Image: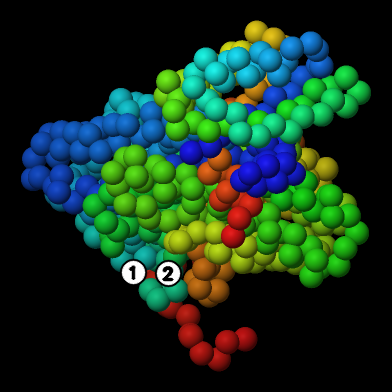
Amino acid sequence: MSIVTVNDIRETINMIQHENLDVRTITMGISLYDCVSDDIGKLCDNIYDKITHKAENIVKVGNGIGKKYGIPIVNKRVSVTPVALIGGKASAEDYVKIAKTLDRAAKEIGINFIGGYSALVQKGMSRGSEELIKSIPQALTETDFLCSSLNVASTKAGINMDAIYMAGKAIKELAYLTKDRNSIGCAKFVVFANAPEDNPFMAGAFHGIGEPECVINVGVSGPGVVAAAIKRAGNCDFGTLADIIKKTAYKITSVGQLVATDAAKELGVPFGIVDLSLAPTPAIGDSVARILENMGLERCGTHGTTAALAMLNDAVKKGGVMASSSVGGLSGAFIPVSEDEGMIEAVNVGALHLNKLEAMTAVCSVGLDMIAIPGDTPVETICGIIADEIAIGVVNTKTTAARLIPAYGKNVGDSVDFGGLLGTAPIMEVSPFSSCEFVRRGGHIPAPMHSLKN
Amino acid sequence: MKAVISVTGKDGVGIVAKVSARCAEYGANIIDISQTVLDGYFAMIMIVEISALTVEFGTFVDRMEEAGNENGLKINTMHEDIFNSMHKI
């Protein structure tokens, strides 16, 4: 064969047809700075016009590239400047109007999520940010495609516990307001430490403050490809295993880079980053948990899981970095429970618990993701879970996040089905002991030391 | 520019002829063919030059897929760049 070998061609086709290789998302980041107006109606008009103009062709271009290379490009999305930065004097009600505008723009251009209904409050809260946070439950209840995020902490600023408390209350209210749809509103809201500004994945995507006017970021996927490669390798030592993962990650990321370059060129927008992530879906054969199990663990969640995940995450980055001219975003293995068939099973058989998931997030991106907890979990317990997760990110200088769903009216033993990529979440047990007095102290946990590291 | 056409399905008379005819119809010039039959199962990988296509590449992809459906075959057409990017450093 003239270009590459027949075996190479077969390998690629097999990855796509049998191992769920796909490009998870092409996300266009759009700055909304020049939409600013002191008139809320005008602001909304500007936002709508800008998004529907800039991203007008993103779906068409994405589908065209998918067809050209014969690979599914699952999602086409848009992220915007954190809305709290462009709201001006907007009240909580005004912010809801902006939310509905974003949702309307998303529907017009045919994308499946728009992110950036966000505020950066790691150090403190501006008036606008506070109003936006207050509006989140209503905004996410009355929209379909809007995603929201808060950055409540950073390694340099410490942890804004007041913001976490507000986030906890918003989550609880959101669960109630969307109780008829299994509290799905909570699946569209994520709380970050050290949030990346070029993340193409939802619900946490936003177009960061130092980003260009418009940019194309791409998120790759491919847990099934890695799992299959490990299975084929059979009984080998860790060095060999790491090597196999690196080579596979290189191939997966190369596809992401190719698609990103093409998309940027066709849309006339600069290429930003490729996010080197292993993003699972609820489909069989597309699970990060199964990768860990193929490494030799009986079930994801048993002893050894954190070490396996650490190795996987590191090898994916090492392989991926070489395949892309610019990497960024979250870049690591995702462990969302509801979106990963192997994780769901691990929870259901009692192998995987919240505490182990928390430990796992110390060595991978991104955090306690898509975790359903009992609907009657107190706000302060939710805040305690978030604070723990955020502290791991702050102290270890990494991104962590929490996307928790206190599913209204549900308890341990139940599960909630969100449909599509969001999957099915078994309700996980939380500690019955109170975090109330701790959370209610309020204020700020100071930034950690950067020396004396032990 | 080249593309890779993969054809799989139950073996039968005239598969290569049908696929080649369709390529000719749209101006795709065949450069290389690798083909085997294993236990009655037909598998072919074809490299074609697509610079002189008479239709857009996306349309060509669709037409080839349709040709596959009409004949009980699975036909995938992919631009060569995906293979080059994955398998060459």
Q: Quadrant of residue A158?
A: bottom left
What mark, if any, has residue A154 been given in the picture? 2
Q: At x 82% / y 29%, what residue is drawn?
A: B36
Chain identifier of the residue bearing label 2 in the image:
A
Viewer-nearest residue: B16 or A288:
B16
Q: At x 81% / y 16%, what residue is drawn?
A: B10
User: Which of the two marks, 2 or 1, is nearer to us in this view?
Assistant: 2
Q: Could you tell me the amino acid type at mark 1?
A: Lys
Chain identifier of the residue bearing label 1 in the image:
A
In this rendering, the answer to whether A426 lies above or below A216 is above
Q: Percent position (x, y) of residue A323?
A: 55, 59
Q: Secondary structure at mark 2?
A: strand
Q: Quadrant of residue A442?
A: bottom left
Outermost residue, left side:
A38
Q: Percent position (x, y) of residue B53?
A: 45, 25
Contact (CB < 8 A) between labels 2 and 1?
yes
| Residue A389 in view, yes or no | no
Q: At x 88% / y 19%, what residue is drawn?
A: B40
Q: Could you tell me the amino acid type at mark 2?
A: Ser
In this rendering, the answer to whether A309 lies above or below B21 is below
Q: Which residue is mark 1?
A: A123
Mark 2 and mark 1 lie on one chain; the one further toward the N terminus is 1
Viewer-nearest residue: B89 or A104:
B89
Q: Secondary structure at mark 1?
A: loop
Q: At x 34% / y 39%, what residue is drawn?
A: A266
Outermost residue, bottom side:
A452
Q: Percent position (x, y) of residue A8?
A: 70, 46
